[in-house]
Image (tube, rainbow, N blue to C red):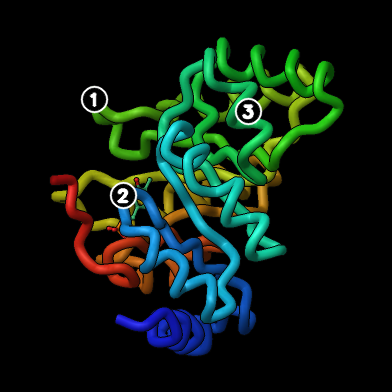
């Protein structure tokens, strides 16, 4: 589906649910996609992208940034502490802060590098064993811990369980954000981004609906 159609659907849902026009930004998730498709979307003028692996992003985005000024890149996949430095230099936002050790590493690197990307805490709203993210009951304490380390948490991010109604998870994420004074919400993917808009997403992360199915070959 053309990117412009996805944007139009976001605008329609904003209008339908009383959201301010343009208050939801579209992250084009370019992981694993062939470079020509990513370039086609850049040539349409889109500049906000998401990648889930540091190594993969490092392989393509420095060149693409040179060719297309104004790119904004979000890390939406798990971050190992030993890749934190590289991630902080490569990304404009890290959406997957999810444990004290990572927060401490980023706080130390922030002082050393004198700069820090925007930071989001990932919440495991479905309390799934295998999934990354802070448990909802631990979210407030973890966010406070990040603040105490000198980190500004600008947003929350979640990936709802596949089998459950996503709107309930989006509503939970918003509730946690509201009570912690956090304004950015990254939620919603190809299958449910309109529901996320309705629940107050400020970022939706859409991959396959824009680029086609990922071929992991
Ligand atoms: C891959 C991915 C997406 C995009 O998924 P689609 O279903 O292709 O839109 C969104 N968020 C995260 C965290 C992802 O890893």
Task: Indicate left or right for 116 with 188 as reference.
Answer: right
The residue pinned by badge 3 equals: 143
Which is in the foreground here, disc 3 or disc 2? 2
Answer above or below: position of 64 versus 11: above
Q: Is residue 17 visible?
A: no
Is residue 91 or residue 159 the one in the foreground?
91
| Mark 1 or mark 2, earlier in chain | 2
**Residue at 64% of width from left, 62% of height from top?**
67
**Residue at 83% of width from left, 19% of height from top?**
111
Marks 1 and 2, Cα distance to the nearest angstrom?
22 Å
In the picture, the disc for residue 32 is 2
Is residue 75 or residue 202 the one in the foreground?
75
Which is in the foreground here, disc 3 or disc 1? 1
Marks 3 and 2, Cα distance to the nearest angstrom?
31 Å
Task: Check if mark 3's residue and mark 2's residue have beta carbons within 8 Å.
Answer: no
Task: Check if mark 3's residue and mark 1's residue have beta carbons within 8 Å.
Answer: no
The residue pinned by badge 1 equals: 130
| Mark 3 or mark 2, earlier in chain | 2
Label 2's element? loop
Residue 2 image offset from top left, x and y in percent: 36, 83
Task: Check if mark 1's residue and mark 2's residue have beta carbons within 8 Å.
Answer: no
Answer above or below: position of 49 versus 126: below
Label 3's element? helix
Q: Is residue 18 visible?
A: yes
Is residue 156 or residue 213 the one in the foreground?
213
Answer above or below: position of 211 versus 181: below
Marks 3 and 1, Cα distance to the nearest angstrom?
22 Å
Residue 13 image offset from top left, x and y in percent: 44, 83
Residue 29 image offset from top left, x and y in percent: 41, 57
Task: Indicate left or right for 164 with 105 as reference.
Answer: left
In the picture, the disc for residue 194 is none
| Mark 3 or mark 1, earlier in chain | 1
């Amino acid at each position: 589906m053309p990117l412009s159609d996805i944007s139009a659907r976001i605008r329609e849902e904003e209008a339908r649910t009383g959201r301010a026009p343009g208050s939801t930004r579209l992250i084009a998730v370019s992981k694993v996609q062939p470079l020509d498709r990513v370039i086609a979307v850049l040539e349409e003028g889109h500049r906000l992208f998401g990648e889930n692996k540091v190594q993969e992003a490092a392989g393509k985005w420095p060149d693409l940034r040179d060719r297309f000024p104004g790119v904004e890149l979000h890390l939406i996949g798990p971050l190992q502490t030993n890749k934190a430095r590289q991630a902080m230099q490569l990304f404009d936002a890290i959406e997957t802060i999810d444990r004290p050790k990572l927060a401490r590493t980023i706080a130390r690197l922030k002082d050393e590098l004198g700069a820090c990307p925007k930071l989001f805490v990932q919440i495991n709203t479905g309390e799934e064993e295998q999934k990354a993210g802070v448990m909802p009951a631990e979210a407030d304490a973890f966010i406070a811990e990040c603040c105490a380390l000198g980190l500004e948490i600008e947003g929350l991010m979640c990936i709802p369980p596949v089998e459950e109604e996503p709107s309930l998870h989006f509503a939970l994420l918003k509730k946690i954000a509201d009570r912690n004074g956090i304004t950015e919400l990254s939620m919603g993917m190809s299958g449910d981004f309109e529901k996320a808009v309705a629940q107050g997403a400020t970022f939706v992360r859409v991959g396959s609906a824009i680029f086609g199915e990922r071929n992991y070959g």
